[in-house]
Image: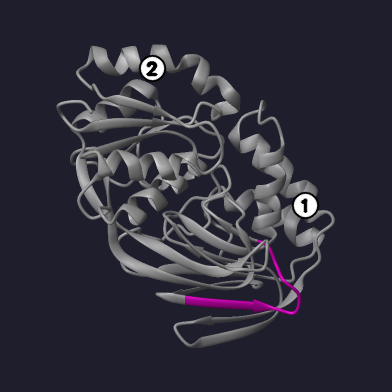
Amino acid sequence: MADDGVVFVVNPASANGSTGRRWPEIAARAAAVGLHGATLMSERPGDVAALTERAVADGAAVIVAVGGDGTVFEAVNGLVRSGAADRVELAVLPRGTGTDFVRSLRLPRKLDEAIEVARTGTARAIDLGRAHYVAWDGAKGEAYFANFGGAGISGAIARRANSTSKAMGGRLSFVWATVAVFARWKSTEIGVAVDGERRSGPMFEVLAMNGDYTAGGMWAAPEAEPDDGLFDVLLIGDVTKADFVVTFPKIYRGTHLAHPKIECLRGATVTIDAAKPLPIALDGEQPGTTPVTFSIVPRAIRVRVPAGGSRPNAS
């Protein structure tokens, strides 16, 4: 453990495997500006959460997650399980495909700037989402997410994007996955309750957004704030292929919400059930299926953000 309580939890497989190859260089650049700490390197899925718990138990004050959205997802769950999420700070050196958590919090994506925020940034308390769902083995599942939870086509898109080499980069990987999955996907009868307000009908997707970006830079919920105690919930109805062609580019500009088959509600609890089990996605990970309940846990985690940073409208 370093004297300043910093621990780097590194996913070497992130950024298509380049993080592991570049870690000595990244660590040297961090050390050169005074960001020193022990390094814990993951070896398999799930390791980041366990390593984060271990680091907290050993006295870490700052966890620096080095990887993409999946790495952040695991670090968040490790912090929650440690019981110290309200006092141990999370910083991120983005090294992944989507980096939507970083976009939503307006964290820098350039390495040296991200290192500086990890070293000197201000702690911002943000909400988390808690998901109760059906795990793939049929057991009851529970996990936390920092940026978004979804049910429907998002789970299939995330699975397709995560199964590719991602060599073409984050945005193109998700564009390709979205187009490929949409071509075969059919809407499903879905029932949704948002703080008791009910909707039902054929839908492609329900997204509970804590942050405002998802899927490699889609500005899905432009008004979402990660510390307001509410989700922005997007209900995407039975859109046609023609709807998709016209509307899909608008998602990157945040101008899609005017579409008559897209509705946005706000609430702290979202329950989703469907005529057939639908895959869910939590920050891009796919732990199981519906039925699922997403609930807000207010200001549950502390994230290092740029000191005095503002929130621009796009990234």
Is-magenta flag for residue 169?
no
Q: Which residue is mark 2?
A: 26
Disc 1 marks a residue whose amino acid type is Val
- Residue 201, image x, y percentages: 70, 82
Residue 87's place in the image compared with 265, above or below, is: above
Disc 2 marks a residue whose amino acid type is Ile
Between 69 and 229, which is closer to the camera in this rendering?
69
Give the magenta-colored segment's residue range: 270-279
Name the side, left or right, on which 169 lies relative to 62.
right
Which residue is at a point 58% across and 24% down the rendered structure image? 17
Residue 142's place in the image compared with 156, above or below, is: below
**Element type where label 2 sits in the image:** helix
Q: Quadrant of residue 50?
A: top left
- Residue 216, image x, y percentages: 56, 42
Q: Quadrant of the C terminus?
A: top left
Name the side, left or right, on which 241 lies relative to 283.
right
Between 138 and 169, which is closer to the camera in this rendering?
138
Residue 103 seen in render: no
- Residue 199, image x, y percentages: 60, 84
Q: Quadrant of residue 190?
A: bottom right
Which residue is at a point 56% across and 47% down the rendered structure image? 252
- Residue 148, image x, y percentages: 49, 58
Which residue is at a point 71% across and 39% down the rendered structure image? 163
The disc, 1 or 2, on the residue closer to the chain's N-terminal end is 2
Which residue is at a point 40% across and 11% down the rendered structure image? 25
Residue 84's place in the image compared with 195, above or below, is: above
Is-magenta flag for residue 276?
yes
Q: Which residue is mark 1?
A: 181
Q: Quadrant of residue 211?
A: bottom left
Residue 61 seen in render: yes
Name the side, left or right, on which 69 lies relative to 56.
right
